[in-house]
Amino acid sequence: MGLDALALSLRENEPVPGDQVAAVERLLQRRLRGESVARIIGDKAFYGLDFGLNAATLEPRPDTELLVDLVLSGLKPAASMLDLGTGTGCIPIAILVNRPDVTGLATDLSPLALEMAEDNARRHQVSDRLRLARGDWFAALADQTARFDLITSNPPYIASEIVESLAPEVREFDPRLALDGGPDGLGPYRIIAAEAGRWLTPGGRLVVEIGYDQGQAVAKLFSAAGLVEIAVHKDLAGLDRVVCAHHIGAA
Ligand SMILES: C[S@@+](CC[C@H](N)C(=O)[O-])C[C@H]1O[C@@H](n2cnc3c(N)ncnc32)[C@H](O)[C@@H]1O
């Protein structure tokens, strides 16, 4: 109805016009078909900030806030960061809002997701510090020569056949490109493990979100790729949720 909480309580005894009742009915029907409230209103709060959503973006999840916490607790001054598969841009935008000295590059395969990330960066006044590039994982960096102090990613990590069994809210409304991590769900981590060292500064940090049962498998991939100081962190539910690693490489 376009009213905020205060206006609603001040006008709660006024009759609601028929066209507005019909509009609310239409929204209710969408909810009954399984669409989340965040998708219906087109906005989702993440790390205390509101992010716009569109059909190509995953709805940011509270689980991902742990990744932002871990990054912010150990980020060196004036760091440069790369976020792979940025969706709404929630990860780099939350980091840049909290760290005015940090600059970043955010990538996604979906042009429509990047449009949303651009809107969100503008909304939170970090567009002058966040560049966007489209492409398949590291291929988006074709024109880039400088390395990064931090690489973050919350890639699609659900095994293809499991995607079909997810709740309708997720399966039918979150984009498949944001969910499907290939036959065993680990496809994007293999690519990230193989190429992160090439793009991190010596001592640079890699921080990725994982599925609750992927901690050991992702830690193993990172270790096999030569990354060190690998740690698996648990979320508030006690489930493995984030893997951190470091690159000890020559400049
Ligand atoms: C799980 S979503 C995460 C979105 C956002 N980072 C977040 O945490 O809410 C994964 C993102 O990776 C993107 N993606 C999928 N395949 C990709 C690829 N091959 N290259 C780059 N991005 C990709 C999707 O479009 C989606 O935005």
Image: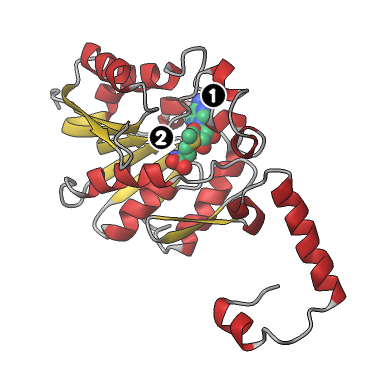
Residue 212 percent location from the top left of the image: 37, 27
Q: What residue is shown at x 57% (from left), y 48% (from top)?
A: 115
- Category of crowding for the residue at label 1, using alpha-carbon neighbours closer than 10 angstroms: few (below 14), some (14–19), many (at least 20): many
Q: Secondary structure at mark 1?
A: loop
**Residue that carries the numbered disc 2 in the rendered image:** 154
Residue flagged by tag 2: what amino acid is it? Asn
Q: What residue is shown at x 53% (from left), y 45% (from top)?
A: 59
Relative to 247, 139 lies left or right = right
Residue 188 percent location from the top left of the image: 43, 21
Q: Quadrant of residue 234?
A: top left
Residue 135 seen: no
The residue lying furthest to the right in this view is: 18
- Report the front residue among 69 and 145: 69
Relative to 244, 31 lies left or right = right
- Report the front residue among 131 and 69: 69
Reply above or below: 227 against 63: above
The C terminus, quarter of image:
top left
The N terminus, quarter of image:
bottom right
Reply above or below: 93 against 11: above
Q: CA distance from mark 1 to mark 2?
A: 12 Å
**Residue that carries the numbered disc 1 in the rendered image:** 180
Q: What residue is shown at x 59% (from left), y 36% (from top)?
A: 170
Q: What residue is shown at x 45% (from left), y 47% (from top)?
A: 89
Relative to 38, 136 lies left or right = left
Residue 82 percent location from the top left of the image: 34, 39
- Report the front residue among 192 and 147: 192
